[in-house]
Image (cartoon, rainbow, N blue to C red):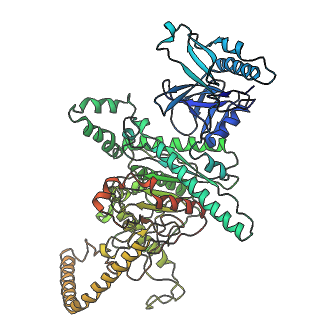
């Protein structure tokens, strides 16, 4: 007797393992979970387990999956061993899982057919006549059928038409068959979690999250970013393993994982039931709905954040989410901090402004916790008087105590304007994030624009002047008329503002064609520095030194033309010196007239001149801890049109290879000092 062949038997194992599947809602296609998650669920005995690397929790008793770090509705969960094969066309088909109660019936029929067709079996005649009625679909019956020596299990209607003409029959499949889940193998190959990054989205998330919009939402982008990072880490590790095998050296351990968690605030402040959204919908014209949707869902986010009340609501929302996810993450990964794990922040677009403001609030609370002395044991720094009196945040009076991170610009003595580097809020925020970020990255950030509007540049400049004055007061000099202080003291002028935020490192990364991105470093330099003297932003690369060949060639060309320009300027040196002398004489005469007209009191003190102060000096910014530079631009392509690149520049950061490599390298080398060659 020849053993018959079977159609639709993808898994011939005696003990058929259950495949666990999920879908968002009724009508969607069921998709299998990762193989490791299916095995864990089969061993769980109905208990809840963590799946997808801890990002979700499966509840087999209730048949649901809940997400631990993103705001998504519960998805459905079910196990299956048998599937209905619904053909869409000649090449494509959909597998619909049979409920377990039906799968048991079908499996029993299949096993009886296998035994009957075996060498010791009684033959298939009786089996081919047997029919079972599905318990979940009583309108269908299942039977074993034979076509030309091939057996199959078919599902068909109990009441068929005359001679079965036009009857729809479905082939039942045993087992799901071979499948792979993108990113599963790479994530399983990596080690434990070593870094958790909270990512704050920017403007327009209300639009990008709509299903009818093709643009990926922040959550989807981070899923892609996580898989890309894991794939690159595993590929690099395997190359290192091959090198070690050739050299007969011990294999390196697998690299640790990096987790990316989205912070979603748009749906909290833009709920459809919110009075603001209701009013906005009412006043919006019905014409050109596509363009008005861009204004309402994208541009309106910026306008909201410029309003103190909604700015506070957004900051409260983001801070609360970070606190909650921080707690949830530690509950799911209890040994993370003990094992040296670290937390970082990434902000994209307006999200970078939110991240900056959150760090400003954290800085304010940290500064308040530092002892500043008391009336019995005061801490006093002798700062000499100056025509324009500058105040440090540690010594503000009650009247000017609001000059800090959440002040409106207001005048102080001598009419010097004080701005703020942080948000303008109706009241102070006491809630802060529960950690100091190991690293903070801004992508496509308009922070430079916001700081300019807040009047932060004069505040940063005053901090620099205060640091200069405090250092001068500490230089010991017995002879007050001495020409210069002792040589052990560095008396070169302080160029970069000492302002810093509580973070281990800070990087402002932007595409040179991004119309939303702005620089930060010029605001940390004196206001009198000419634009052409400002240090150029650094080119982004993983280790800070490996630049592409065409970028190096462009640098050489720019340096060459700069040298030509400096040589040509020598011919006009005599003319410039005469003009400068005349201008200085006019300025001195004007100053004397002003003094004479004000009874010897100079009401408009001359601003210090900083032209040329940066030339030949290396700028080192204290804004972000170990990172001495702040502004980094993505390396342009070989053929790169600025205007064409501007269309996609702002939305391409999470898929940019340079950004991904930079994150991987710096998360691995968090203890190293990153220095970038210009």
The residue under the point 51% across, 62% down is 662
Vertical comparison of 389 with 170: above or below? below
Rendered location of residue 526, percent (x, y): 36, 72
Q: Quadrant of residue 403?
A: bottom left
> Quick one: which residue is furthest to the right in this view?
120
Locate the C terminus and report the quarter of the image it occupies. Answer: bottom left
The residue under the point 54% across, 7% down is 159
Vertical comparison of 420 with 53: above or below? below
> Is residue 319 found left or right of 270 in the rendered image?
right
Locate the N terminus and report the quarter of the image it occupies. Answer: top right
Does residue 584 show up?
A: yes
Rendered location of residue 34, percent (x, y): 62, 39
Does residue 426 show up?
A: no
> Quick one: which residue is furthest to the front in this view?
1
Q: Quadrant of residue 95?
A: top right
Rendered location of residue 499, percent (x, y): 46, 65
Rendered location of residue 407, percent (x, y): 38, 53
- How many numbered circles are shown? 0
Vertical comparison of 29 with 629: above or below? above
Question: In this orientation, which residue lies closer to the viewer: 24 or 17?
Answer: 17
Q: Quadrant of residue 607?
A: bottom left
> Is residue 338 found left or right of 377 in the rendered image?
right
Question: In this orientation, which residue lies closer to the viewer: 631 or 176?
Answer: 176
The residue under the point 57% across, 54% down is 231
Question: In this orientation, which residue lies closer to the viewer: 61 or 188?
Answer: 188
């Amino acid at each position: 007797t020849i053993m018959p062949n079977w159609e639709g038997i993808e898994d011939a194992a005696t003990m058929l393992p259950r495949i666990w599947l999920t879908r968002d809602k009724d009508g969607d296609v069921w998709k299998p979970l990762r193989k490791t998650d299916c095995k864990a669920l089969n061993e769980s005995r109905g208990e809840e387990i963590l799946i997808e690397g801890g990002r979700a929790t499966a509840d087999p008793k209730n048949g649901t999956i809940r997400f631990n770090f993103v705001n998504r509705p519960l998805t459905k969960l079910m196990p299956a061993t048998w599937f209905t094969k619904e053909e869409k066309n000649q090449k494509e088909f959909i597998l619909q899982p049979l409920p377990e109660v039906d799968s048991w019936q079908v499996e029993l029929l299949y096993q009886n057919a296998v035994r009957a067709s075996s060498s010791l079996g009684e033959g298939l005649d009786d089996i081919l006549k047997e029919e079972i009625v599905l318990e979940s679909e009583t309108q269908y019956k299942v039977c074993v059928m034979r076509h030309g020596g091939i057996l199959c299990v078919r599902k068909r209607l109990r009441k068929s038409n005359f001679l079965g003409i036009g009857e729809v029959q479905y082939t039942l499949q045993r087992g799901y068959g071979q499948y792979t889940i993108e990113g599963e193998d790479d994530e399983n190959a990596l080690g434990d979690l070593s870094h958790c990054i909270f990512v704050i989205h920017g403007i327009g998330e209300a639009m990008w999250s709509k299903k009818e919009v093709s643009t990926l939402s922040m959550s989807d982008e981070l899923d892609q970013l996580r898989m890309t990072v894991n794939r690159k880490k595993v590929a690099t590790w395997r190359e290192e393993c091959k090198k070690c095998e050739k050299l007969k050296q011990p294999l390196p351990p697998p690299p640790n994982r990096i987790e990316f968690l989205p912070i979603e605030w748009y749906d909290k402040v833009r709920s459809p039931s919110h009075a603001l959204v209701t009013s906005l919908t009412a006043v919006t014209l019905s014409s050109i709905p596509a363009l008005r949707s861009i204004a309402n869902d994208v541009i309106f986010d910026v306008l909201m954040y410029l309003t103190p009340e909604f700015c506070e609501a957004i900051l409260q929302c983001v801070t609360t989410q970070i606190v909650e996810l921080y707690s949830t993450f530690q509950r799911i990964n209890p040994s993370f901090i003990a094992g040296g794990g670290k937390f970082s922040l990434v902000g994209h677009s307006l999200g970078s402004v939110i991240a900056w403001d959150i760090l400003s609030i954290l800085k304010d609370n940290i500064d308040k916790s530092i002892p500043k002395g008391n009336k019995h044991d005061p801490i006093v720094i002798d700062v000499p008087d100056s025509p324009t009196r500058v105040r440090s945040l540690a010594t503000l009076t009650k009247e000017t105590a609001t000059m800090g991170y959440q002040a409106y610009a207001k005048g102080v003595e001598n009419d010097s304007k004080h701005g703020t580097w942080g948000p303008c809020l109706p009241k102070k925020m006491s809630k802060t994030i529960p950690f100091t970020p190991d690293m903070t990255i801004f992508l496509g950030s308009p922070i430079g624009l916001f700081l300019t509007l807040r009047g932060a540049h004069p505040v940063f400049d005053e901090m620099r002047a205060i640091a200069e004055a405090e250092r001068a007061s500490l230089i010991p000099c017995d002879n007050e008329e001495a020409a210069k202080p002792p040589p052990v003291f560095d008396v070169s002028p302080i160029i970069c503002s000492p302002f810093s935020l509580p973070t281990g490192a800070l990087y402002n990364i932007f595409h040179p064609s991004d119309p939303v991105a702005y620089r930060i470093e010029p605001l940390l330099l004196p206001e009198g520095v000419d634009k052409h003297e400002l240090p150029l932003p650094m080119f982004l690369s993983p280790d800070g030194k490996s630049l592409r060949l065409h970028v190096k060639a462009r640098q050489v060309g720019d340096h060459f033309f700069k040298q030509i320009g400096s040589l040509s300027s020598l011919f006009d040196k005599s003319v410039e010196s005469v003009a400068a002398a005349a201008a200085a004489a006019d300025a001195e005469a004007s100053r004397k007239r002003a003094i004479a007209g004000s009874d010897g009191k100079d009401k408009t003190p001359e601003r210090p001149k900083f032209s040329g102060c940066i030339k030949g000096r290396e700028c080192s910014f204290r804004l972000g801890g170990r990172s001495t530079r702040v502004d980094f631009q993505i390396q342009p392509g070989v053929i790169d049109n600025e205007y064409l690149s501007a269309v996609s520049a702002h939305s391409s950061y999470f898929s940019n290879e340079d950004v991904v490599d930079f994150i991987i390298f710096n998360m691995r080398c968090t203890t190293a000092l990153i220095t970038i060659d210009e």
